[in-house]
Amino acid sequence: MSKRIVVNNLNVYYGKFKAVEDVDMVIEPRSVTAFIGPSGCGKSTFLRTLNRMHEVIPGARVEGDVLVDGENLYGPGVDPVEVRRLIGMVFQRPNPFPTMSIKENVLAGVTLNAKHLSSSRKDEIVEKSLSGANLWEEVKNRLELPGSGLSGGQQQRLCIARAIAMSPEVLLMDEPCSALDPISTLAIEDLIQELKETYTIVIVTHNMQQAARVSDSTAFFNIAGTGAPGKLIEMGPTEKIFSTPDNQQTEEYITGRFG
Amino acid sequence: MSTDTLPESPADVAPQPPSSLIPAKKRIGDSVFKTLSTGAGTTILVILALVAAFLLVQAIPALTTPQDQQLANGYGYFPTWIVPFAFGTVWAAAWALLLAVPVALGIALFISHYAPRRLAQGLGYLIDLLAAVPSVVFGLWGIIVLAPAMMPVYTWLNAYLGWIPLFGGQVSGTGRTLLTAAVVLAVMILPIITSLTREVFLQTPKLHEEAALALGATRWEMVKMSVLPFGRAGIVSACMLGLGRALGETMAVAMVLSGSDVITIEILTSTNTNTIAATIAQNFPEAFALKQNQLIAGGLVLFVITLAVNMIARWIVARRAQYSGAN
Amino acid sequence: MSTTVAQKSIPSLTAGKLPRGTTPGVLVASVVVTGAVTALFGGFNLAGTVVGGIVVFLVAMYAASWAVEGRRKASDRLATHLVFGAFALALIPLASVTWEAVSNGVARFDVQFFTYSMRNVVGAGGGAAHALVGTLWVTGLATLISVPIGLMTAVYLSEYGRGTLARSITFFVDVMTGIPSIVAGLFAFAVMSILVGPGTVSGLSGAIALSVLMIPVVVRSTEELLRIVPNELREASYALGVPKWRTILRVVMPTALSGIVAGVILAIARVIGETAPLMIAAGFTQSMNANPLSNAMMTMPVFVYDSYAHPGVDVLPYTERSWAGALALIAIVMILNLVGRFIAARFAPRTGR
């Protein structure tokens, strides 16, 4: 189910402004990779280039390659819509569709893409995805109620269920806990540990403890100053990054001297 | 097209390597949908161009026919015929504006700053209901109810203030005067001015208001110091839009006023200058040939006048938008 | 209030204050005194007494407040009274129009009014069935023309539009908003004169005139609603690999649907009472005409105008029909308004924040 991502020489631009410069990176399958770094260092922007969601932002464009098991996402003829079916994404704030019930939210990816499934197959997907997101027990008796009626943490898990219902290869998470309370955050972190058995997970986080808790490897991004592009400073196994980083900047950041 | 948020895949640029990522089909839905919506937008431009073109085509005879033929077959020589009605249009609308603005500002302040919070929205709806009354009903009301009711006021104004030319002359016996028409117009434009200024007043930064109150200002002083200055451009543009409405309003004037083509500034007499819109409405059903062309040309003149007023209003709003970034 | 505390500790914070109940007391007294004085001189008149009484009240309160509370407080009171007065003043025409329409319209607000046309009717009897049918046709056709164009234009402006085309559409929609209704009527008439033949009036022509007035309203309200649909929902849909057009159709538009429907209903309510353009484009007739493609078609607003403006020898039945039509028209518009607002409020999806 999961694939290795190789990023070669990637630059991201907003119009003329270079937002991220020259990133090379390998993301291993069935692992959790965390992106950390100060605000505005381009980590969220870079995350979006992994499933071409940056193209939703007017003027954003990319140079370089992102290879998913050898296939280039930016190769000629590649359809961004297909890329996103392969690589799911969870956003900073929970965003269930307000017009849909819990069940419809989970099935949104299927129904919105006009795939016709038998109702037993649908029920199967709903249960599997909600169980996968540790939400089944909490909502199994109110699947027809609106998704926006859930708590923030439940909504975020609903969004994760919605993403994994598409059976993606990779799951991208853009600060998925930043709008949640500590207990909901813990639930999501536990969930991430379970999900990595199946998926390749990339998570952007502002919270260094969270990166240390959930990730197998960590990438540290930084910027030289305002207006300068973000760069990948150092990447390695999480334990190493948080104990004996090679780079001076990484050490200063994780010991809390800036950012 | 580089700004398109979801670029189409350049499927035909290169031979496609076999891959699960690459769809065989091109997304027809996207291009159809985009074409449809772009087409709809373009249709609006076409419609507007057609409005201008068709009106021009129909109006041209009124402008090109020799003067003597216009006098013989039309209502008169167009350039001189239209002048009193253009004056009447502006004159009636100006009075309507004069009457409506103070009341509208009062109502807007009432709803935004004076009425109890819980009632404010409901009371706002009540004023909006005025906008829901069809103009023909206002016309009926104006002539049957308002005109007779205003008679004592007119007699009084004429008796005591008749030395002012405005209120001079022989008071109309029916109440069907320019002032009655202006009152009806004022009632009709009240809701639009109210709702626009109300929105502006509600946007007054709380900080400005609290700063004024913290200096020991009374509520009225707070309104004078923060709400009104903040809303000045909004008030002006709301008035201009109200004026545009009043200029183009037809039925109320057509029904209330027994208008003529005499230019007069007296507003209480039975001789009143007609408006362009009312002239068209009153004469169009019986008009034919050149007369029809002249009325359509009159409509074009009205269009130009309202367009100018509306443009000024938009310009004021746009200019204000440049300054309000700080908030 | 805190003044009682202040009175004990820091006397300088208290100020002269008119006792409670002064305002209504002075108001009543002013009106009564004005009435008495005018009655004394033999010129009593209810409306005059009320107006005069209010003027006396404003002056008296200002003077009293100045004497007891100071000039600033007096101005504040005056402003408050004027602001309340402005609101009350606006309610007078609203109440009066409603009252007159109901009391005068009820006489002919009967079954016959809604089932008979005016064909071969002189004097009493007859009804507005032909006008009602005409209004349904004309408004229905106008809606049919305006909603697709307006809706898709709004989609273009909020989802696709950037650059010159979008800017010019926005600009010209603004221009269109300001077209006087009678000019819209002239446009429809001119179009028909050139395309079909001089002097052609029909229901369709009326519908074209109303569309010119309706399209900008639909565009404005729909665009505004599409723009407030959170971008996060679009992103969520894109991230699921949903193409843009399906995202708009299945996620963005349903989220804004109740508001869009309400906006369309309010737009209908706005044009259904238009008179002048229909007089010119759809014409007058006393007979039922259920074919919008040919011949004049009567509509409710034109019926109201025609009944009043062109009465027979016996004026009363004509005026009564006119008022009944006005009442029906007000009822239709009010109901449309209420339904629109109800839909907007009731079916709005909760975004949860």
Image (cartoon, coloured by chain):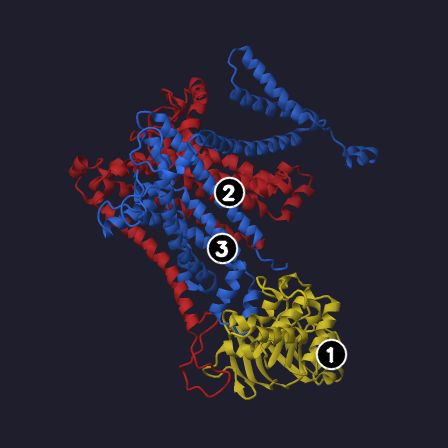
Q: What's the CA distance linking mark 3 and mark 1?
A: 48 Å
Q: What's the CA distance linking mark 1 and mark 2?
A: 57 Å
Mark 2 burial class by Cα count in 10 Å: few <14, some 14-19, many 20+: many
> Along the line of sight, which residue is nearer the eye, B147 or C78?
B147
Mark 1 burial class by Cα count in 10 Å: few <14, some 14-19, many 20+: some
Can you tell which of label 1 and label 2 is closer to the viewer?
A: 1
Q: Residue B77: percent from the left, percent from the top?
A: 21, 37
Q: Are marks 1 and 2 in contact (CB under 8 Å)?
A: no
| Disc 3 chain ID | C
Figure check: A221 above or below C299: below
Q: In what element is the residue under mark 3?
A: helix
Q: What's the CA distance linking mark 2 and mark 3?
A: 28 Å
Residue C260, disc? 3
Q: Quadrant of the C terminus of chain C?
A: bottom right
Residue at 37 percent of width and 34 percent of height = B253
Residue B235, disc? 2
Indicate the colour of chain C.
blue
Q: Is residue B65 left or right of residue A37?
A: left
Q: Quadrant of the N terminus of chain C?
A: top right
Q: In what element is the residue under mark 2?
A: helix
Q: Do we see residue B97 in this rendering?
A: no
Q: Where is mark 1, residue-wise? A: A212
